Amino acid sequence: MTRHRSDEDTELAELGFAQSPCTVALFDTDLRVVRANAEMQRAVALPEDRMRGLRLTEILVHAAGEETEQAMRKVLETGERRQVENRLRFPGEPGEPARSVTLASLRDRTGRVCGVCLTAHDTTEHDRARERLLLINEAGSRIGSTLDITRTAQELVDTAVPRFADYAAVDLLTFIDHGDEPPPGPLTGSVTMRRAAAGYAAGEVWAGSLQPGDLADYPASSPAAQPLATGLTGVYETTDAAIDGWAVHDPARAARIRLSGAHSVLMVPLRARGVTLGVVRFARSDRPEPFEQDDVLLAEEITSRAAVCVDNARRYTRERVTAETLQRTLLPLRLPDQTALEVASRYLPAAGRVGVGGDWFDVIPLSGARVAMVVGDVVGHGVQAAATMGRLRTAIRALADIDLPPDELLTHLDDLVIRTSAEVDGAASTDAVADAAAEAAGGLGATCLYAVYDPVSLRCSLARAGHPPPARVGPDGTADFVDLPAGLPLGLGGLPFEAAEIDLPEGSLPALYTKGLIEARDPDLDEGLTRLRQALGRPAPSLDAVCDAVLTTTGPDRGRSDRPGADIALLVARTRAIGASDVVTWSLPSDPEVVAQARTRTTDPLAAWGLDQAVFTSELVVSELVTNAIRYGQPPVQLRLIHDRDLICEVSDAGSSSPHLRRARVYDEGGRGLMLVAQLTQQWGTRHTPQGKTIWADISLRPA
C-alpha cells in the first residue's frame, strides 16, 4: 500500500517534536499542557501523560513560572511571538540553568489562535562564555589602574569575587617588600609569602584566614608552594582526604578550609616576564559548580594580566625609591649657616606615575660674605633625571667655587651640558649601559636660575637660563617679579646669557622656584604667577610660614591630590645686611713702604670688634696679600676687612693675573707668602671683577 506524502510529513514532524534537543511543550487556550516532548519530560521528571492538563505554574512552582504564564496569556490575546529571559528551574535538573524561553501562538486552519508553543533553550554555556568575556574585559580595564602593588592585588581580588570565586587571595614573595631583584625561573623549596590582598563574597568562615599584611611560611610540598616550583596551576578538590593531607603541613589552615566549606580551589602562579612574583588562590564554597578547565584558563588569563601590572608596579616602586633616595642624597641635607640670608625651602616630588624629577635648589656661601642661591629643573623624571640633577648641582658648586659671575657660570654650565649630550649621542647604543646613557642624555635639557647676594652692598646679581623669573618682596610688603632676561635653556647653546643687578634692601624677600609651582593648579603661567605674587604679599610670621602659604595658594589642590603632577622646588630668603660698622676699607698707594702702614691699620678695627686674639694672624695675612698686590698687581690697591662669622681680609688691585700656590724650593725668594696665608687661614682664593681681581682670605674666629 502506498503511503501519502502527508503521512510522511506528519511522521517526520512527530519525530522532530519528540527528538528535539530543546525543551518543547504545547498548551491549549486554558494554558494547560497538551503535548510535551522527551526533553521536557526529562527536565520536569514527569511522563507526558502525567503532565497533560497541568498548568506551567503547577509544574514550575516559582516566580519564573508565573512570569512565563503571564507572557503566554499575552500571546493568546495578541497572537504575537514573545521572548522571555528568565531562569526556569525544572524539578528534574540539578542546579539552576539559564533558560531562554520563546512563546509562539498555535493556529488552526482558519487562523484562529488555539494554543501556545513553549520552547526553552538552555543558554547556560552561552551565558558562562559571556560572563567569562565580561570578566576578562573587566580585568583588563580594572586591574592595574595605579602603579601600586597592594592596590593592584586588591583589584584582582575585587574582580574575581564574587563573579568568579567565593574567595580570592594574593600572596607575594617577600623579595618585593625588600626591593630585591627576583630570581628568574621557578622557585623550589620552602617559601615565605606576604598576603597582599584577600576578599570573600559572604560569610564569616573566611575571617580566620590570613589578612593583608600577614606573613606565612609554606613548605615545599604545600599546595601554595607547588605552583611556584612548577609554574603550573594547581587544581584541588578539598575532600576530607585532601584536607587531611594538607593538615600535615598546616593544621590550622586545614581546619579553616574545612570550616569554610570550600570544595574547589585553584592555585595560580603569579608570573610576569619570566619572574615568579607569588601565587593567587581562588576558592568556591557557596557556588555548587567546581572549577572546570575553562575556569582554569580564565583564572590564568586574569592572573597573567594582574602579574604584568604587579611587576610594573614593583619595577616602578623600586625605581621611585631609588630616585627618591638619590634625590635626597643630592639635595642639600641642610642649608648652610651664613650671615647674608635667612633661608627656608620646600621640595615636593611629583605624584602618581610621574615620580621624582630633576628639580633642585642650593645655597652656596661665597667669598666676601656673599651667598649664591640656585634653583634648577631638569627635563624628565626618574633615576636619570635625578642623576643629571646631581651632575649639574656638582658642576655649579665647582664653578661657584671660582667665583664666576652668574652669566659666565651659566655659559660654562651650558657648555658642559652640550659636551655631555654630544658624547652620549656619539656612542653606539649596543648594550644596556649605552641605552641608559642615551636615556640620561635625553634628560640633560634643563633650566636654571643663579643669583648672588652681597650683604655689604645690598646688591644682587642674577642670570637665568630659560627659568621662570624670581619674585621679590620689598621691606614694605610689595611683591613683584624681577625683570630679568630669560635666556635659553641649558644645552641649546646660541645666545650668551645676560645678568642683571637689583637692589635688595635689608628685610627683602627673594623667592626662587621651579615651573611646577606655578603650573600645579593651572597650566596658565600668568594665573600661576598672579597666585604666587598674592601669596608672597601676605604677611607671615616666618619664612616657613611663607613657604606653607605659597604651597597652599599655588601648589597642588589638596582636594584632588596629595602631591603635584610635576616636581616643585621653592627657595625663599630674607636678606640681612652687614653694617658699615663691621666693614673698613682703605685705598693704598702702590708702594712697598705702605705694607707696614697696612699692618698697623688693622689693629684699631680689630680692637673695636673685640678680636684682639686675631691681631697677630691678621697682620701677617694683610702683610702678605698687600705685598703680593703691590709686587705683581696693578694700582689702585684697596684693603678691606669684614667682620662676619670669620674675619674676612680682601686686597684688590687692577691686575688680572691670579696668584697660585706653589711649593718654594730652598733658594727661592718667592712662593712662601701664599703658603703662609694658606696655613694661617681657613680658606683663601681669588675672584675676578670688572675692575681687576680680589684676593681674599677667611681668618677663623672660632675656638680651635
Image (spheres, helix red, strand yellow):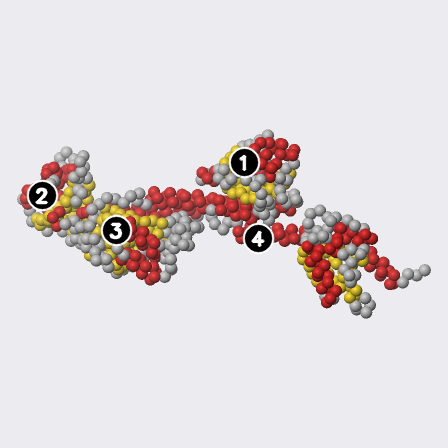
Q: Secondary structure at mark 1?
A: loop
Hey, which quadrant is residue 169 in on the image?
top right
**Which residue is identified by label 3?**
541
Judging by the rendered image, the residue that carries numbered circle 1 is 187
- Pointers 3 and 1 in contact (CB under 8 A)? no
Q: Is residue 677 above or below residue 464?
A: above
> Residue 414, image x and y in percent?
31, 53
Give the residue number, with chain letter if any, for mark 2: 608
Left or right relative to 696: residue 437: right
Residue 678 appears in the picture as rendered: no
Give the mark, 3 or 4, whose residue is nearer the N terminus.
Answer: 4
What is the CA distance from the residue labelled 2 to the residue labelled 1? 78 Å
Q: Position of residue 263 (x, y in %)?
A: 64, 40
Report the residue that reaches farthest toward the right.
Answer: 1
Q: Quadrant of the N terminus?
A: bottom right
Tell me if residue 473 can be seen.
yes
Q: Residues within 10 Å of mark 3 (few under 14, many from 20)?
A: few
The quarter in which the C terminus is drawn is: top left
Residue with the mark numbered 4: 137
As shown in the figure, which amino acid type bears the numbered disc 2?
Ala
> How far apart in space, not on screen, are marks 3 and 1 (Cα)?
60 Å
Q: Foreground mark, 3 or 2?
A: 3
For badge 1, the amino acid type reads Leu
Q: Are marks 4 and 1 in contact (CB under 8 Å)?
A: no
Q: Residues within 10 Å of mark 1 (few under 14, many from 20)?
A: many
Mark in front: 2 vs 1:
2
Q: Of the residues under marks 3 and 1, which one precedes in the sequence?
A: 1
- Label 2 vs 1, first from the N-terminus: 1
Tell me which amino acid carries mark 4: Asn
Q: Is 317 on the left-hand or right-hand side of 602?
A: right
